Amino acid sequence: MSTREKVGWGIGGLIIIVYCLFPVAWIISLSFKSSDDIANGQFLPTAFSGENYEQILVGDAAGLFLPALVNSFGICLIATFISCLLSMFAAYAIARLEFPGKKLILSTALAVAIFPVISIVTPLFNLWRQIGLYNTWPGLIIPYLSLTLPISIWTLSAFFREIPWEMEQAAQVDGATPWQAFRKVIVPLAAPGVFTTAIIAFFLAWNDFVYGISLTSTEAARPVPAALGLFSGASQFESPNGPIAAAAVIVTIPVVLLVLLFQRRIVAGLTNGAVKG
Amino acid sequence: MASIEMSHIVKQYGDGYPAVNDVSLDIADGEFMILVGPSGCGKSTLLRMIVGLEDITSGDMVIAGDRVNDKAPRDRNLSMVFQNYALYPHLSVYENIAFPLRLAKVPDEEVRKRVEEAASVLELKEHLQRKPANLSGGQRQRVAMGRAIVRAADAFLFDEPLSNLDAKLRGQMRTEIARLQRRLGITTVYVTHDQTEAMTLGDRVCVLRKGVIQQVASPRELYEQPVNLFVAGFIGSPPMNFLPATVEGTALSTPFGQVELGQERAEKVKGHELLLVGIRPEYFEDASLVDEAKKPHGSTFTARVDVTEWLGDAQYAYIPYEAPEEVAAQLKELSRELDSDQLRTQAVVSIDSTSRIREGREAEFWLDTRKIHVFDPKTGENLTRDAEAGRKLTEMAAEDRVDQVERAKV
Ligand SMILES: Nc1ncnc2c1ncn2[C@@H]1O[C@H](COP(=O)(O)OP(=O)(O)O)[C@@H](O)[C@H]1O
Ligand SMILES: [Mg+2]
């Protein structure tokens, strides 16, 4: 690459980064503005204040926010775990076995994934109330599985397809049962795929708003995105933008941490060297 | 240690096409058997049926006296080296080699001993802690071999193990494999489409064509007494030349003049109108360089040389000839099937590297008629094959093998 090209790419990259990160920076800056500073008409707060964080963590809004945080974590982690486990087996079967209805499963999964959430939430609301799942953790975990499973099955089966058949056959010749071959060879090789899938599934569940607001009524099960919508200002005339921004920053932290923590695993092309180089 | 006996093995894939068709083959305990043939002839399929990765449609597979048709791979106690090595990328070289032992729950101390033993045989000692991704092609190949030899398997199976290596390394590993097999004395089945590997490694070679066995014999027998056109054309490089011929008394009339067969062979080819004579390139020589004493064993002819190739230790001359339509078509078909790309009907002739024969000129050649074979173009059958002589060659090879194994043990 010539110097000119390098500079061009650099500038291009910079523009994209600024464009993507600007809203994030804005939210962070907003979260540090005190309530009378919010409308100061400038990007940075006049004085950095922890008022908003105080309010959602120990102040008035803590009652709304902290249980919601616990709910979100609990529900999303459980949903992610179940969906990874199920989709691992499903995807393995899809990638490795020839069975009737394989196409049907994949296309149904796709259909479920693109099905508009809003159209099933009302019937679900009625059903859940009748069978007692309304406003409970399982009442959210189940619909979250419908969000996360299709995409998990698709991504994981793509990953499994990448793993050479011969890996497993070699293990079988070496004396492994099919289960041992799966556990000792396929699962470790698929680990980056499973991590990627887990993260995608977690985000999908973590970001959900419609189910969260419709299928819960109290802090027994209400997740963060729904709770944010219920924040109110100190008075009727004050908008709750500051606390919302602070809460938004807090819920973004686990997402960023997850990506930073696992990006090596996600990126690592673990299958390198499995076959001829 | 085990013998492998196959009787009437058939493999049909989903579409009903028999990839392996009625193969019966006995491999003796400790024997090095080569499966060879053009790509797609069913070599891998046969190997994978032995190891248990492919179901057997019909027939019996007997290993060490037990019928194993319905046994899972892990119950057959065979070890296999895959074409692309199939190393476990998440495990170190040590753990890769130890993998079969770990599955068998061998104690740690024993594992260490055996892995180190295998590693020192294969010169992998300094790489034991590395991951396969960081190794060169040759090293990976050796790790795959290590994984195969670390366990006391009944037989080794190789599926084109050297085809991913460059030519120099391939030569090294070839001799390595030969030495290892002799030392361990373990029954080995080795799939390849490489001439040199087939000729140098095997005690016996099994030539397959479209899933059907053509001939099973020692490399020498295959070379000197092939059963048919296919085997004759497949074994040898550059390949055997096939010239159209007609019988005239006890001689054949070919594009390169009259070739005397002698009473006995003439008897065998009688009654055929059109024939194909198979002549290996080295049966030719520059006539001016042939001993007077040798000359009566052959015939001389003059021909125009199209191209010469001088390789230092050898020299090849290409001589075009005319062939009747039907023969030309059949030869083209044969060379297509053999994966060679001979476009025109021309003979490849090996002449001494000091020969002054140059391209574009007429030159006089001598042809040794003692070892030529005559084929029936319709059936491909070798009409002049001397089965007795062939059997002797294969017996000799078997004796050599016993001798070599004895020596390697000392
Ligand atoms: N899984 C399969 N399904 C259907 N046909 C196959 C399959 N594997 C191999 N074949 C066919 O069987 C024949 C033999 O294949 P193979 O044993 O791999 O040949 P080789 O190893 O000699 O090149 C080929 O014609 C190939 O197309
Ligand atoms: Mg093959």
Image: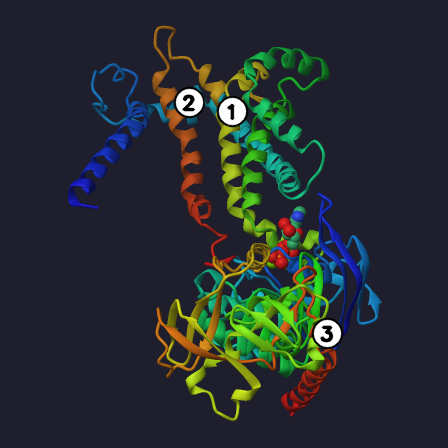
Q: Which numbered disc, 1 or 2, marks the residue closer to the eye?
A: 1
Amino acid found under the numbered disc labelled 2: Gly
Q: In which quarter of the image is ligand 2?
A: bottom right
Query: Considering the numbered disc 1 on the image, is that residue within a helix, a strand or a loop?
Result: helix
Say above or below: B62 vs A10.
Answer: below
Q: In front: mark 1 or mark 3?
A: 3
The residue indicated by pointer 2 is A59
Q: Estimate how packed mark 1 is, as few (under 14), some (14 to 19) or many (20 or more) residues with alpha carbons within 10 Å.
A: many
Q: Is mark 1 within 8 Å of ligand 1?
A: no
Q: Could you tell me which residue is drawn at 52 percent across and 88 percent down? A: B295
Disc sitting over residue A68 in the figure: 1
- Mark 3 element type: helix
Q: In this view, does B174 lie to the left or right of B230?
A: left
Disc 1: host chain: A
Q: Which amino acid does label 3 sit on?
A: Lys
Q: Residue at x 71, y 64 (%)?
A: B213
Kindly indicate whether the residues beneath marks 1 and 3 are on one polypeptide chain.
no
Q: Mark 3 points at which residue?
A: B268
Residue A58, image x and y in percent?
43, 26
